[in-house]
Amino acid sequence: MSILLGRSPGRPTPEAAPAHTGSRTTRILGAVTLAGVVGLCLCAFIFSPPDSRPGPEAGTRIGQFDAVRLMYVHVPAAIWTYVALGTCAMASAVYLWRRSAWWDRLAHACAEIGVVLCAITLITGMIWGRPVWGTWWEWGDVRLVTTLVLFLVYAGYLAMRSVPAAPEARARRASILGLGGAVLIPIVNRSVEWWENRTLHQQSTLEELRIEDLTLFTLVLGIFVMGVLALWLAVHRFRLAWLEAEAESAGLRAALAERRAEAAEPAAPTAGSGEGTPSAGAAGS
Amino acid sequence: MREVLLVAAKDLRIELRSRVLLFQVAPFAVATLVLLGFALDADRSALRHFSAGLFWVAVLLTALLAAQRSVAVEHAGRAADALLLSATGPARIFAGKALALAAQLAALELLLGVAMVVLYDARIEHFGLAVASAAAATVGIAAAGTLYGVLAAPLGVRETLLPVLLLPVFAPVLIGATRAFGDALGTAAVNGWAWFGLLGLFALVYAVFGALAYGPLLEAET
């Protein structure tokens, strides 16, 4: 919790807001992310070889060639989409049980990161599909279609969160949506196994270790870097949501104090009344 | 069960008196089917081939209107507060409203079914499968529509928000019902009863989830 809130030991209450979205932890996470992205780019674009194997005819080569490099972003983005949206569902369930704003904001932050990662998964998948499958989109592929539905469900979640409403009511509605959408996560994840004959997606290459050496290392590095990046973004988004809520309640408190001060002040003397005489309005307030 | 029927009867009575379903939603449903016919260039063989999918697209678009209408009657004059004060449990209120919505959808599907046979030259070859899959799909649509309807109801943008929330959720129903109906109409070589199973599972999941989630949602609204 303290990582998400970034609070100092001097702030013992769990509801205390951070002063800003940055902290020593996020700076370390940011540095690790930056170093990881540089390392991933070097491995993905320079060190790792293109996917190319001898073809059935002499002198020919088959494979995905340079398109395979998209896998280093596509697969990690898909994995962390499941994690982010799964965390959103888990946080939504805990919110319904504990009714703590902390869990609601965690669900919100994870949903935003999850939707962005899901969009990256879909876009990189389409770019990869054009040269390898010969099409941007394949309706017959169950994983592709279910991933799009997952994206739309959580885009709807974010749309609902963006509508102005009382925080408590909005949190309750959002947690129902976040929980309901999670039904799709295992379906998307296992669709390749459940509908073997209705997919162009290959079975998991990581589980069976069908790739090796530098390609495998780059893929694992990609998963690690995407994970750190997602965590870094989620922490900042969580703290931003916390600050937004604080600013909203501070604005409300300030407005209330202003109105109370106005009510307590004696009204300005009118033309007909003598100087220093309290007006009837002030007396009656 | 008596309370469920009371809530359902109340909603159906409102519809009978207001006649919104008859004079607004039903013409919209038929107009949708006609426009989809124009979209396929009014080609009779193509229309017949795709009649199952076109029928369910029309049903789902109509269900959006019916779901909005179902929550609008509770929101007008804060009728939902009175419903809660009646000490009827949220799960029963949900079941009653879903039952009323399912009854309205069934009537609309009957109308659309006749229109599909007349306009698209569709022929029902397996009547039992068509009725069973339509019943399962209707229960699923009504349960999801009631749940998501109350979710978007108190917000000022429910007319635009509800389709955004509900249409992706309806995707499995559209896929399953189209396949099952395709088998029933003899336009798709699939096992329609397997897709009926999926529709039944969807209906069960949303009926249970809706009954559990309706309480917190009604609390949020009040």
Image (spheres, rainbow, N blue to C red):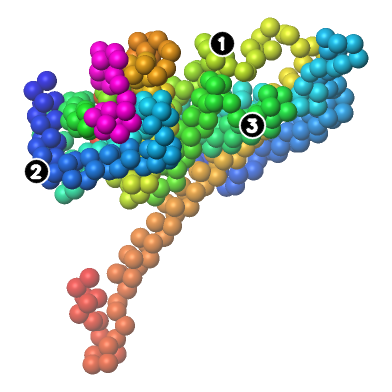
Mark closest to the chain's N terminus, 1 or 3 = 3
Residue in view at x 48 percent, y 29 percent: A149
Q: Secondary structure at mark 1?
A: helix
Which chain is mark 2 on? B
What label sits on residue B142 in the rendered view?
Answer: none
Residue B50: image quadrant is top left
Residue with the most extreme front position:
B44
Question: Which residue corresponds to mark 3?
Answer: A136
Q: Amino acid at mark 2?
A: Arg
> Mark 2 Cα within 10 Å, few/some/many (few <14, many 20+)?
few
What's the magenta bit mostly, secondary-structure-wise?
helix
- CA–CA distance between discs 1 and 2? 52 Å
Residue in view at x 40 percent, y 10 percent: B191
Residue in view at x 18 percent, y 45 percent: B23
Answer yes or no: do the residues labelled 3 and 2 have beta carbons within 8 Å? no
On whether disc 1 and disc 3 are found on a single subunit, the reply is yes
> Mark 1 Cα within 10 Å, few/some/many (few <14, many 20+)?
some
Residue A141 pos. (x, y %) = 56, 21
Q: Amino acid at mark 1?
A: Glu
Question: Which residue corresponds to mark 2?
Answer: B17
Residue A107 pos. (x, y %) = 48, 33
Q: Is residue A247 above or below residue A223?
A: below
Q: Which residues are magenta?
A: B113-135
Of B188 and A55, nearer the camera is B188
Residue mark closest to the camera, 3 vs 2: 3
Of B89 and B38, nearer the camera is B38
